[in-house]
Amino acid sequence: MGFNYETYEQYDFDHRRRQWHRLRTHQKLTALGNTILITGRDQAKLDRAKAAFPKIHAFQSDVSDPKAIATLYEEVTRQFPELNILINNAGIMREINVHDKAGSLEDITREIEINLSGPIRMVKQFLPHLKTKSNAAIMNVSSGLAFVPESGPHCQDHFSAAIS
């Protein structure tokens, strides 16, 4: 597969826009006196976020791993029993060639595990706790591709539509 500059440029724009939205969300939630917890697969990215926003609390976890979600739930609810909002924002987008015999089924279904099954698992795990709070909320953030799909071999469009 060749490098497609146009796709990269669009991805880079989307990535920067998501970073800006995360920054603004963090600023607004912090200004309202909220405690911010973030999770992610990549510890280096979590460390950079923590350096940029010292008041956040970072937890390494993977939404595609049910055991990791259970561990995350135990850690978070023990340390932050007043947790009342879950914002699912995990997602990946890759171009996958399903005709390539070298690709494994696990690799092909990775987007499904993270983009669709991950938020479902997080809600299932955290819902009993959130139901004990008077002002609880669950927010699922998806890509705009749910409403304006790209052409090309992306599964992201369908996952975004499913989670929206």
Image (spheres, helix red, strand yellow):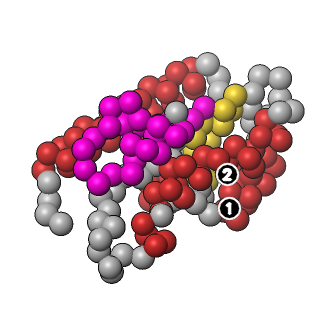
- x%, y% of residue 99? 29, 71
Which amino acid type is marked by label 1? Pro
Residue 31, relative to residue 145: is it above or below?
above
Q: Is residue 89 left or right of residue 131?
A: left
Residue 90 magenta-drawn?
A: no
Q: Which image quadrant for residue 143? A: top left
Residue found farthest to the right: 132
Residue 109 is at least partly visible in this image: yes
Is the residue marked by circle 1 packed among few (<14), some (14-19), or many (20+) residues within 10 Å?
some
Residue found farthest to the front: 99
Is the residue marked by circle 2 packed among few (<14), some (14-19), or many (20+) residues within 10 Å?
some
- x%, y% of residue 160? 46, 40
Query: Image point 57% across, 41% down: which residue?
Result: 88
Which quarter of the figure is the N terminus placed in?
bottom left
Residue found farthest to the top: 32
Q: Which residue is mark 2?
A: 121
- x%, y% of residue 149? 32, 37
Give the extent of the magenta segment.
Answer: 139-163
Label count reads 2
Q: Which residue is mark 1?
A: 66
Mark toward the start of the polypeptide (1 vs 2): 1
The one nearer the camera, 128 or 105, is 105
Q: Marks 2 and 1: in contact by CB < 8 Å?
A: yes
Query: Image point 46% across, 73% down: which residue?
Result: 105
